Image (cartoon, grey):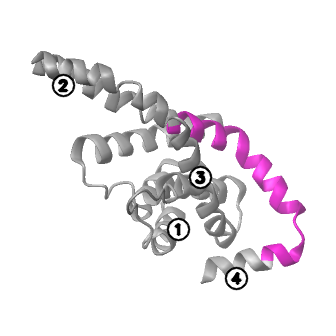
């Protein structure tokens, strides 16, 4: 699972860097794109495509408005696809778990906001110095490094958390699983 976790964390990092910092489209991190890539990396593109379409419908209306922090759709999607493929779990269960996983991940990302904000004086100093080239280099390095934080968290979540999640779901009563299936089908 460690190798798969590394590959999926790398996929998340590449997509996040391209989408958020280089292209600024915020389309590549959508479940309809990320899930098929995750499925392809894991050798099951069909599951990735099916889950991508399903998860896109779940995360479709979720967006950052004002100061709200929506669930991280990419993380929730990749971990849900990994959980489904690695454990042969029911897709409905994984889909219903993707929103809480994304919510937890956005909370973890938010914990690192002060670290990112600590670089503001450096960027201000570089911007006022007039050295545009140095400013651009430091900004690109930051753009490459900042997405590594959620990628590392995702690596550990997949490498060491999928089996624990499987054991937790196996220990849940039947009525909880029925509720999760009903919630995912809404």
Secondary structure at badge 3 equals helix
In the rendered image, residue 23, in percent from the top left (x then y), is placed at 22, 46
In the rendered image, residue 176, in percent from the top left (x then y), is placed at 82, 73
Which residues lie in the magenta part? 150-177
Distance from Cα at disc 3 to Cα at disc 4: 20 Å
Q: Nearer the viewer, mark 4 or mark 1?
A: 4
Instruction: Give the residue number, with chain letter if any, for mark 2.
Output: 136
Residue at image point 72% right, 55% down? 87
Q: Nearer the viewer, mark 4 or mark 2?
A: 2
Secondary structure at badge 2 equals helix
Mark 2 or mark 3: name the one nearer the start of the chain.
3
In the rendered image, residue 72, in percent from the top left (x then y), is placed at 50, 55
Residue at image point 39% right, 54% down? 29
Disc 4 and disc 2 in contact, CB within 8 angstroms: no
Task: Tell me if mark 4 has few (under 14), some (14-19) or many (20+) residues whose alpha carbon lies within 10 angstroms of its own.
Answer: few
Q: Nearer the viewer, mark 1 or mark 3?
A: 3
Instruction: Give the residue number, with chain letter if any, for mark 4.
Output: 182
| Relative to 13, 156 lies left or right | right
């Amino acid at each position: 699972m460690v190798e798969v976790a590394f590959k999926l964390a790398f996929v998340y990092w590449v997509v996040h860097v391209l989408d958020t910092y280089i292209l600024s489209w915020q389309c590549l991190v959508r479940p309809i794109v990320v899930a098929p890539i995750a499925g392809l990396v894991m050798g099951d593109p069909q599951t990735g495509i099916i889950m991508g379409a399903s998860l896109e419908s779940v995360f479709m209306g979720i967006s950052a408005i004002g100061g709200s922090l929506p669930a991280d759709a990419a993380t929730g999607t990749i971990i849900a696809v990994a959980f489904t493929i690695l454990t042969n779990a029911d897709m409905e269960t994984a889909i219903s778990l993707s929103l809480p996983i994304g919510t937890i991940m956005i909370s973890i990302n938010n914990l690192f906001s002060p670290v990112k904000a600590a670089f503001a004086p450096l960027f201000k100093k570089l911007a006022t110095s007039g050295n545009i080239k140095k400013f651009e280099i430091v900004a690109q390095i930051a753009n490459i490094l900042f997405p590594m934080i959620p990628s590392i968290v995702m690596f550990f979540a997949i490498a060491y958390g999928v089996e624990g999640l499987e054991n937790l779901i196996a220990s849940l009563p039947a009525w909880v699983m029925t509720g999760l299936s009903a919630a995912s089908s809404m």
